Each structure stands twice: as C-alpha cells, then as structure tokens.
Amino acid sequence: MALQLRSLVRANGILELTLHDDPIPEPQANEVVVRIEASPMNPSDLGLLFGAADMSTAKISGTPESPVVTAAIAERAMPSMAGRLDQSMPVGNEGAGVVVKAGSSPAAQALLGKTVAAIGGAMYSQYRALPVAQCLELPAGTTPAEGASCFVNPLTSLGMVETMRREGHTALVHTAAASNLGQMLNKICQKDGIDLVNIVRKPEQEALLRGLGAKYVCNASSPTFLEDLTQALVDTGATLAFDATGGGKLAGQILGCM
C-alpha cells in the first residue's frame, strides 16, 4: 500500500487534508511506476492543497498514523470553490524518484531502476504510475531532490519568452526576479539575446542577479526605483510584464513607467 495526500473542500465550508492508503499501482505497457522521493511545492500546488481556506484556523485530529487537518473557508470565498466541492483531490504537480516497475514497452523497460523527474499530478504520493512521455531521465548522480523541479518553473520561463514573441514584444519585465524561476528566465533571455528588466526587493537579490549576468535590475525598495525602472524601460523598450507578486501597487507602477 502507498500513501497519497488528498485535499477535500466540503460544501459546509471546511477544507479537509487527509492521507489515503492506496494500492501500489501496476504500470500499463508504456508506463512506469515511480517511487516518489522528492516533490516541490509550487504556488499552483498550494492553490489546490489549501483552496480558499484560512489556514490560521487549521486544526489537527485523527491519529499519528492517519492525521486529518481541517480549516475553515469564509462564506464569501466559497463560490470560487464551487467546481471542486466534495471531491477528494490528489495534490502535487511534479516530483522525482526511482522507477521501481516498468511496463512491457522498450521505452518503459529502459527506465527501470533509473532516477527520473516526472509531471502529471498526484505527485504527493509514495508511488505514482506515469506514461513514459511524462518522465525525464536525470543525469547519473543527480538526486531526486535536485531534479524534482524540472517542469513547472522551466516551462513557465519558456512560456514567458514564447508569449513575448507571439505577441510581438521584444523585451520583458519580471517581478520577484531573484526567485528560482527568475534565475532560469535570466539564463534563457541571456542565451536568446532578449533584454530582461528584473525587479527585486532586496540589495542581496540584486547582487545575486548581477552575479548571474543580469544587466537590468531594479530594486523596488530603493528611493530611486521609479527613475531606475523608467530608464530600464527606455533602454530595453519592454512592453510586456509578468508580475509574480500577485497584487499591490507594483503592477500599477510598472504600467505607469511604461
């Protein structure tokens, strides 16, 4: 048997987190079974895991072997949960581990015993059956913890660049730019010759990005932030911004400087 983390939003406004004990899956011909050893927590994972619950109200019950976490959801937030009411939903977009079972196809058999990164949902599980196409064999010596974030952040970074190109822009602005995703985006833009305006909040974050070769870094806590941002926008001609901070005055400041 294998444990899997589930999230349930009840119609009475209670979030419920539980561990389900499910049989270890058997792979189809072109599938492998991965023993998950590491899985990151992305913002999208948090959204599914906690929903609109107020986690300051969280309570733990059950037993040490089978704990249950509950939290209240405000009545005004319940309409946003309508699509998932009373459904026990597995959590976790991506992860990494060792292939312990493989289907009969040559592609599946080739991964047996290998350490792979994988994407496909329900990754907060001890074992997960996945199509071979959703697995990425990691280089020899790479640990599952090192390879667990191979999909969400890299694909998001690439998606930003492709969105810029498809919409006819020539440069980008990115907030929370010293994050793991932001560092990836910097490397992509440098390789592709794309000007990127990075917005950070701390001097050490600015130093980190400049150490990676970033040319345009604006510190939102600096008294000259708006002047610095305006000059960076003039220099780059950036007309597209991705705001990872999700609100506040920063988005308006960027638009104002544009």
Image (tube, grey):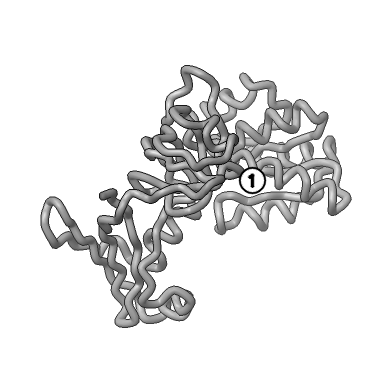
Viewer-nearest residue: 26 or 173: 26
Task: Determine the residue positioned at 28% across, 67% down.
Answer: 16
Q: Is mark 1 on a helix, strand or loop?
A: helix
State the image coordinates of residue 102 (x, y, percent, origin top left): 47, 39
Classify 166 as above or below 222: below
Res. 187 image quadrant: top right
Task: Determine the residue positioned at 36% across, 45% down.
Answer: 127
Classify 144 as above or below 64: above
Viewer-nearest residue: 230 or 208: 208
Res. 68 image quadrant: bottom left
Residue 197 is left or right of residue 220, and the answer is right
Residue at the disc numbered 1: 156
Circle count: 1
State the image coordinates of residue 254 (x, y, percent, origin top left): 70, 51
State the image coordinates of residue 73 (x, y, percent, origin top left): 33, 73
Viewer-nearest residue: 129 or 206: 129
Residue 151 is left or right of residue 192, and the answer is left
- Can residue 200 be seen in this snapshot? no
Task: Determine the residue positioned at 25% across, 56% down.
Answer: 21
Neighbourhood count class around disc 1 (C-alpha, 10 Å): few under 14, some 14–19, many 20 upward:
some
Circle 1: residue type: Thr
Res. 177 image quadrant: top right
- Can residue 240 be seen in this snapshot? yes
Residue 238 is left or right of residue 23, and the answer is right
State the image coordinates of residue 72 (x, y, percent, origin top left): 28, 71
Which residue in the rendered view is the most extreme toward the left?
A: 63
Task: Determine the residue positioned at 59% across, 36% down.
Answer: 107
